[in-house]
Image (cartoon, rainbow, N blue to C red):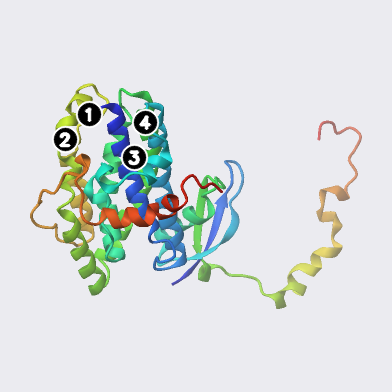
Amino acid sequence: MPLFEVFVRPRRGLQHQHAGSLRAEDAELALQYAREIYTRRREGVSLWVVRSSDITASQEDDAPAFFDPADDKPYRDATYYALPKEVKGL
Amino acid sequence: MSLLEAVVGLGDDALVLGQRLSEWCGKSPWLEEDLAMANTALDFLGRARLLYGYAEALGGCDEDAYAFQRDARDFTNLLIYELPCADFASACARQFLVDAFDALHLERLSESADAELAGIAAKAHKEALYHHRRSVAWLVRLGDGTAESRCRMQKALADVWGYHAELFAPVEAEADLIAKGVLPDRAALRPQWLAAVTATLDEATLAPPGADGRIDGGRQGQHTEHLSPMLAEMQHLHRSHPGARW
């Protein structure tokens, strides 16, 4: 049976978050099982299920090229910049 | 029939079906379905507890006494709920018929003149709508599935079909409560139920089972031979250790 990844939106206004995975014959059954397994303790208000094979994932080997270059670019963080005195209420 | 008897009858329906569903715990086709079955069983057990709790408030006994200290003759559930499941298809076939009934019946019961009963029914109705969605999906999946799943589902439907009439059979003793608006008139729900069921059977490419049959007596405590063995298993622990708590 195909593997599905389950995403749960905990509350309105929050984004869906990965909750786990399950096996099901198709998407409708996967959605029902996601309800049974991942929302039975009031964890969510919305569900997505996605076939795991439809996810394109970065690989371990990609990590140096993908993520290391961000390490020395602190100017991409808002905290890098001093706040002008004139700016109020930020 | 008193309100108390009516509430106990509905509680018995829920408890007996909950027990039958819980028999699948650890035996479902795969893990996810096992959890789904157990969740559904717990929904019915929860419904039974609410109804028995109300029965106690109406002057009845406590919930454990209703569940564990009565013999088959004292249970007043409709017969369709007590039937054993020969295979997964038979569990799905019965569930499909009763979920379709619940979706209609509980909606009407939630408008009961009795506020407590109406509240319990409103809560249960939300669960029933989900149960119905689940059982429709299984009916279509197995009916319009492989040659074997289709054959098993067709046989399972034929086996359970004769018991559906009791869901709608007027019970003389209920007439007074129906007149007072406490209970819905179950007989009046049948055309709508049949239309919904037939539409799903079509979608599942299953032939509607033949003759209606007419098997009833559950509300009068007249049961099939299947209820006593089920109760023996369900009640064994409580009867062996009366009053035990953990």
Q: At 37% across and 27% down in the image, what residue appears?
A: B59
Badge 3: how crowded within 10 Å, few (<14), some, or many (20+)? many
Q: At 73% across and 70% down in the image, what residue appears?
A: A66
Q: Residue B34 sits in which quadrant?
A: bottom left
For the question of whether residue A72 can be seen, the reply is: yes
Q: Secondary structure at mark 4?
A: loop
Q: Secondary structure at mark 2?
A: loop
**Type of the residue with mark 2:** Val
Q: CA distance from mark 2 to mark 1?
A: 9 Å
Badge 2: how crowded within 10 Å, few (<14), some, or many (20+)? some
The chain to which mark 3 is attached is B
**Type of the residue with mark 3:** Gly
Q: At 35% across and 29% down in the image, what residue appears?
A: B117
Residue B120: mark in rendering? none
Q: Which residue is mark 2?
A: B171
Q: Secondary structure at mark 3?
A: helix
Position of residue A74 measured from the top left corner of the image (x, y, whole percent): 86, 57
The chain to which mark 2 is attached is B
Residue B11: mark in rendering? 3
Tell me which label, 3 or 4, sits earlier in the chain: 3
Q: Nearer the viewer, residue B6 or A13?
A: B6
**Type of the residue with mark 4:** Gly
Left or right: residue B245 versus residue B195 is right
Residue B1: mark in rendering? 1
